[in-house]
Amino acid sequence: MRRTRKPPKQPLDHEPAAVKYARDNAGLTQEQVARLCGVSRTLITEIENGTRNATPRMIGKLAAALNCPRVVLERKRQPEPAEEGYRSRGMATVGGQAAGRPLPPPPAPSRGTVWSVPNRRERDLTQ
């Protein structure tokens, strides 16, 4: 009797096509990659086919074996869509609950004030 494997979590932590592409570019076989990573060839096959999820540790081993940046093998996450909430409709909240009143307008800039939108690096540093 053959056991069937449960499907991996969705979305996967790695990009299966990127793993295969990086392996082909490195000129290695699945067997060679498996030996370099210290795992079985079957696991490498399943990772490339997307039937098995690669752990973050395994993604690091693959990146080292394939001589490519880790970010190439990781799945690119799509940003979560913003929930339709009170903030997006311009309503104030108090303690996570709707306060039932509109948000106050932003303060008017004084003379000589330059308003700028922080770039990604500046925004990340302030959080």
Image (cartoon, grey):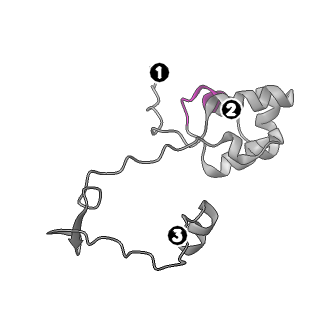
Residue identifier under label 1: 2
Q: Which residue is mark 3?
A: 115
Q: Position of residue 79 (x, y in %)?
A: 47, 47
Along the line of sight, which residue is nearer the eye, 70 or 122?
A: 122
Query: In what quadrant of the picture does the N terminus appear?
Result: top left
Task: Name the secondary structure under disc 3.
Answer: loop
Q: Which amino acid type is shown beneath numbered disc 1?
A: Arg
User: Where residue 114 appears, x then y in whole percent?
Assistant: 55, 72
Q: Between 88 and 26, which is closer to the camera in this rendering?
A: 88
Q: Is residue 90 above or below residue 77?
A: below
- Mark nearer the N terminus (3 vs 1): 1
| C-beta proximity under 8 Å, tags 1 and 2 | no
The Cα atoms of the two marked residues, 1 and 2, are separated by 30 Å
Q: Residue at x 55, y 78 (%)?
A: 112
- Whether the magenta-drawn stretch holds residue 108 is answered as no
Measured in 3D between alpha carbons, the distance from the residue under mark 3 to the one under mark 1, in whole angstroms, is 65 Å
Q: Quadrant of residue 76?
A: top right
SS assignment for the magenta stretch, majority: helix
Magenta stretch: give its range. Answer: 44-52
**Where residue 17 sits in the image (x, y, percent)?**
65, 28
Point out the residue furthest to the top here. Answer: 1
Q: State the image coordinates of residue 56 (x, y, percent, origin top left).
A: 62, 50
What residue does disc 2 label?
18
